Amino acid sequence: MKAKDDIPQPARRHALRAAVALALALAGALAAPAAWAQKYPDKPIRLVVGYSAGGGVDAVARLLGTRLSAVLGQQVMVDNRTGATGLIAAEYVAKSAPDGYTLMMGDSALLAAKLLQPKMTIDPLTSFRPVAGAFISPLMIVTGNDFPAKTPAEFVKELKAHPGRYSYATSGVGTVHHLGFEMLKQMSGSRVVHVPYRGAAQIVPDVVGGQVPIGVVSATAGMAQAKAGKLRAVALMNSAKLEGAEGVPALAEALPGFDVAPRIFVLAPAGTPDEIVDRLSAAVKTVLDAPETGTAATAQGTLRAYATPAQLGKDLAEETKRWQRLIAEQQIVAEGK
């Protein structure tokens, strides 16, 4: 074995050059994510929505997207990819490049979909990276004006006193509207028949017309007709007050601890770098902190509800467990099964 001094000079120089090259390469690799984050975004961002234009999630996606464009310095374009209750959009985003240029505006229905359709190719908790919580969308229980209850307590008492007499309409199996009312049934020990509609547009007219006695709808849709005297706003399903619906009591008055509202949030494909997620989350917070955003959100029937990536991830996991227990205990199955 040769001593160090016996190594020829050319070999020493070659080894030194190799060591320097390796050090430079490692330094470049470590600096690359930071440089990437500094220039991000340098092209338009796609915000995918799984519902048609004009719906509740689409409306707040456009509200957020327009304002994010100003904060990020790049256009944030809303891309509606409808079908399968948002699953088509979710699969598209989950399979997109994790570079921060394809995002999803998701809602709580995505969490229930996995529980009701186990053959889904994606998992909301593992196929995405949480970016930011954005809004909640308060729900309202409405009835016809001749329904024999005006307050949450009277409403629960009436349902319990007449098992199976009443039915309630929602915008579909697995929506938070549906799961929230099933939670009401579970907590109150009542029995009410679910009537799933293909969408929300016909529920209010059918409640007004007497075709169905109870409806679970967005607070905005319910209040518009309640103020016109065409139906009765019995209760809000969440505890936070909504401007314009201050006179509507929370269901928690009759069922302590009851608090249900669809969560609306931003997701990125799994594998999106921390630097990009943090940049996006900070931009969402900047938008939501602006007073004019609160005013615009209220006009859409939503409330601002920012959450960090870590908090959103925790919230989604806890909400999934909540719906998982309810679906099992209430023996809820997807339509067509």
Image (tube, rainbow, N blue to C red):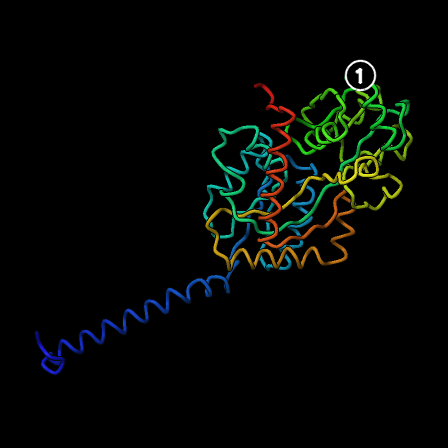
The furthest residue to the bottom = 5
Q: Is residue 130 above or below residue 238?
A: below
Q: Quadrant of the N terminus?
A: bottom left
Question: How many circles with numbers are drawn on the protein?
Answer: 1
Percent position of residue 286, x then y: 67, 59
Name the amino acid type tagged 1. Arg
Quarter of the image for residue 249 reads top right
Counting from the top left corner in percent of width and height, residue 265 is at 63, 46
Question: What residue do we see at 68% from left, 31% from top?
Answer: 179
Quarter of the image where one finds residue 86: top right
Q: Residue at x 69, y 36 (%)?
A: 55
Observer-nearest residue: 280 or 67?
280
From this view, report whether residue 301 is shown above or below residue 279: above
Q: Is residue 266 left or right of residue 221?
A: left
Taking the view exactly as shown, the residue that stands out farthest to the top is 165
Residue 323: give x, y in percent of width and height. 63, 34
Tell me which residue sits at (60%, 56%) in the image.
Answer: 281
Q: Position of residue 135 (x, y in %)?
A: 69, 47
Quadrant for the C terminus, please: top right
Read off the residue under disc 1.
165
Q: Is residue 26 left or right of residue 259?
A: left
Q: Nearer the viewer, residue 220 or 334?
A: 334
